[in-house]
Image: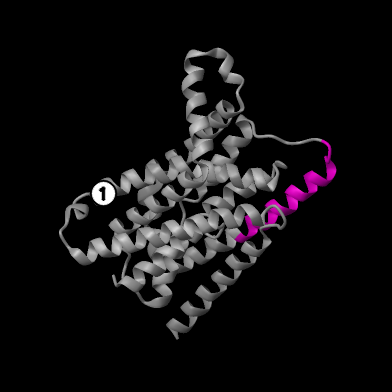
Amino acid sequence: MSILQSIILGIIQGLTEFFPVSSSGHLVIVPYLLKWDYIPLYYTVTVHFATLAAIVTIFHREIFKIIKALVLAVFLKSKRNDSSFKLGIFIIVASIPGALAGFFLKKYVEGFFSRPLAVAIFLLVTAAVLAAGEVRGRKIEAGAKEQRVNFNLFISMIVGIGQALAIFPGISRSGATISFARFFGIKRSESVKFSFLLSIPIIFGSFVFELFESRNVFFSSDFLAIRNLAVGFVFSYMSGLFAIKFLMRLVERRSLNVFSLYCTAAAAVIFIFYFFEKI
């Protein structure tokens, strides 16, 4: 892997981890379209940690409040009505389907990471889910302008199922979780924030697992490998910060339909490229 590849892939990971366009899908299709070699697992570990660091940087106050509320609620029953405690419970509940999917389906899903056409199909699924979520969310908001819909255990579990589906490359984790929340009429900005906070356990769990899988590489004395890891981390972290802030501002004024169109266009490019490659 060259330093240019490290930069490009780091930026792609940081942006697509939070933009609803599937980071795992892009880490398949970009090397495929550019004829690059397979991305080493140790590099994937590093850029995943960078995106986790970006989330913690942006939401460190909320994360501290949630952890504090969960700990205090163990000893003080009165703290269990705290909004941060409830949010923490909702995140835990929503994390269960993704953890189960990762544990039981990982070996089955691995085959899709070498099949660009499958990624293209899953990108179309993401596009459809994003569009449907926007339509459904607007319809509910228009019919109940005075009534605010909040997260509860049931909605959190359904959103968690959306996150579990993102184990397939091309199905966006953030797109699925945001859209599944929108199906119930949750405000777009609240859906995005919950999606970001919900990503922390799943990204951390994935990072720990991948780190264990490639632990020997991190003790390597290969200067080029260490350089590429450092470059990838920096660019993934910086682009991740940008993506989080940009998306949170965007959803205050606009829908996510632009990302639905992007996923459709990306799928079309893969189909066309694959067709001409086979001619």
Q: Residue visible at 50% across and 60% down?
A: 16
Q: Quadrant of the C terminus?
A: bottom left
The answer to whether residue 11 is above or below residue 175 is below
x and y percent of residue 137 in the render?
73, 48
259 and 54: which one is in front?
A: 54
Number of other residues with Cα within 10 Å of mark 1, as a class: few under 14, some 14 to 19, many 20 or more: few
Q: Is residue 94 visible?
A: no
Which region shows up in magenta? Answer: 127-146
x and y percent of residue 169 in the render?
46, 58
Q: How is the image coloured?
A: one colour
Magenta span has 265? no
Specify the principal SS of the magenta part: helix
Query: Disc 1 marks which residue?
Result: 213
x and y percent of residue 187 in the render?
70, 44
Q: Residue visible at 31% across and 49% down?
A: 210
x and y percent of residue 211 in the render?
28, 48
- Which amino acid type is shown beneath numbered disc 1? Glu
125 and 136: which one is in front?
A: 136
Q: Quadrant of the N terminus?
A: bottom left
53 and 146: which one is in front?
A: 53
Q: Residue furthest bottom?
A: 279
Q: Is residue 259 visible?
A: yes
Q: Residue visible at 37% across and 50% down?
A: 49
Q: Is residue 256 left or right of residue 278?
A: right
Q: Secondary structure at mark 1?
A: helix
Magenta span has 144? yes
Q: Is residue 97 left or right of residue 49?
A: right
